[in-house]
Image (cartoon, rainbow, N blue to C red):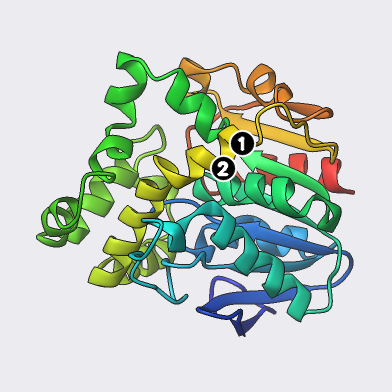
Amino acid sequence: MALFPGFEPRWFDVGDVVIHGVVGGSGPPLLLLHGYPQTHAMWHKVATQLAEHFTVVATDLRGYGASGKPDGGGSPPHWAYSKREMAADQIRVMGSLGYERFDVVGHDRGARVAHRMLLDHESRIRRWAVLDVVPTLTMYRKTDRRFAEAYYHWFFLIQPAPLPERLIGADPDFFLTRHLGSRHGGLAAFDPEALSQYLRAFRNPATIHASCEDYRAAATIDLEHDEADLGRRIRAPLLVLWGKHGVVETCFEPLDDWREHATSVTGRALECGHYLAEELPGATAAELLAFLK
């Protein structure tokens, strides 16, 4: 808890999994969802600033951090890690705290969960923000050589088990530090305590498997759900932020891509790479506060 002074650790029984998180601050409720291969700890540099104005809830997605890690098998395949199930977890977390409507901010995988939350539970969300992503379906449909080379892990992690699990599990510290350190900010962007939490979580073979299942779901059942919702445009106001030195800036048109899915979209690039909340926390918090307040 050294990363989140004034926050309290919480565990939420949402049905088939227990979701871990921290809660702090006061004011309107705000949910923060992390990306791969991280945990809720990625928000530590901005959470205290947001907590001056909001009751901040930062959770570990199912399969990550200290949250539950179902196997991911069953029928249809990868259902347990569909963004529909992951979104439902977070809706139940906020409901258990008594929040029927709230704001949500998601980075990377958490942004994809947030997108599905809006599609399945739009009446529950007041405003939302996504960091350094465009919609999953858009990214797959626009895949080219540049994207495939930069985001090779999208295509590596979806290989059938146990291939990526065995390869990553042979040296998880190397894989994680290589993955995090290969982006614009390098490993210097990460607080040593936060990085140690990411490493500790990723040394668990169940976390490695769950994260692969997350990506396998994104390439299968999530695409089916997204295609079924094509043509729907979310009305809740959306803020899109991305790194000027990242793949989203290079390969996509973030505002245009999101405007195909939402009616009220604003945002801009920040002078950083993929990990906005850790590389450029002050500017990220300022943008979020200006939008959410």
Q: Secondary structure at mark 1?
A: helix
Q: Secondary structure at mark 2?
A: helix
Q: Is residue 103 left or right of residue 255?
A: right
Task: Tell me residue 249's x, y (percent).
Answer: 52, 20
Residue in front for this viewpoint, 64 or 120:
120
Query: Is residue 49 in sight in this rendering?
Result: yes
Question: Vertically, is 246 above or below 190?
Answer: above
Residue 228 — which label?
1
Q: Are marks 1 and 2 in contact (CB under 8 Å)?
A: yes
Task: Tell me residue 61's x, y (percent).
Answer: 51, 64
Please tell me in which quadrant of the rendered image residue 211 appears. Answer: bottom left
Please tell me in which quadrant of the rendered image residue 203 appears. Answer: bottom left
Task: Tell me what residue is drawn at x 12 percent, y 53 percent.
Answer: 167
Question: Vertically, is 42 above or below 239?
Answer: below
Task: Tell me what residue is drawn at x 61 percent, y 36 percent.
Answer: 228
Pick the quarter of the image with the N terminus: bottom right
The residue where tag 2 is placed is 225
Q: Amino acid at mark 2?
A: His
Question: Vertically, is 210 above or below 226?
Answer: below
Query: Is residue 275 in sight in this rendering?
Result: no
Task: Tell me what residue is drawn at x 58 percent, y 37 percent.
Answer: 226
Task: Tell me residue 32's x, y (percent).
Answer: 65, 58
